[in-house]
Image (cartoon, rainbow, N blue to C red):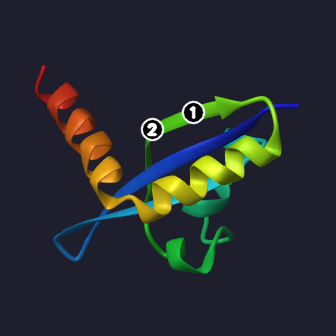
Amino acid sequence: MHFFVYLLLNNYKGRQTSYVGYTSNLKKRLLLHNSSRGAKFTRGRHWKLIYYIRFNNKSDALKYEYQLKKNYLLRKKIKLKYFLSLKD
């Protein structure tokens, strides 16, 4: 079984908001977030998946999720890379 750590982005009240999470089923999890049945923070907003990485075990996924949640510079770098790819 594979686990994914992902970064979601939305435009809420004119601000870019991001959310980091982990799951074993990425499509289902994104659907839950966008149908207001995901994490409480994500309810009522439309989210776009901008980044994910796959892990072979849950432990590594949880460690990376924690790192990505706490490291705002890394998160900012990923968002910047995403916005630059839109301009191409």
Rendered view: 66 above or below 12: above
For the point 71% across and 32% down, the residue is: 55
Q: Position of residue 39 (x, y in %)?
A: 63, 72
* Tag 2–tag 1 contact (CB < 8 Å): yes
Query: Residue type at mark 2?
Result: Tyr
The residue where tag 1 is placed is: 53
- Secondary structure at badge 2 equals strand
Question: Which quadrant is the C terminus positioned in?
Answer: top left
Q: Position of residue 9 (x, y in %)?
A: 37, 55
For the point 60% across and 80% down, the residue is: 40
The residue where tag 2 is placed is: 51
For the point 69% across and 44% down, the residue is: 61
Q: Position of residue 29 (x, y in %)?
A: 68, 52
Q: For the residue carrying disc 2, how many other residues have a C-alpha within 10 Å: few (<14), some (14-19), or many (20+)? A: some
Question: Which quadrant is the N terminus positioned in?
Answer: top right
- Secondary structure at badge 1 equals strand
Query: Residue type at mark 1?
Result: Ile
Rendered view: 78 above or below 63: above
Q: For the residue carrying disc 1, how many other residues have a C-alpha within 10 Å: few (<14), some (14-19), or many (20+)? A: few
From where the camera sits, is residue 2 visible?
Answer: yes
For residue 7, side relative to residue 17 (left or right): right
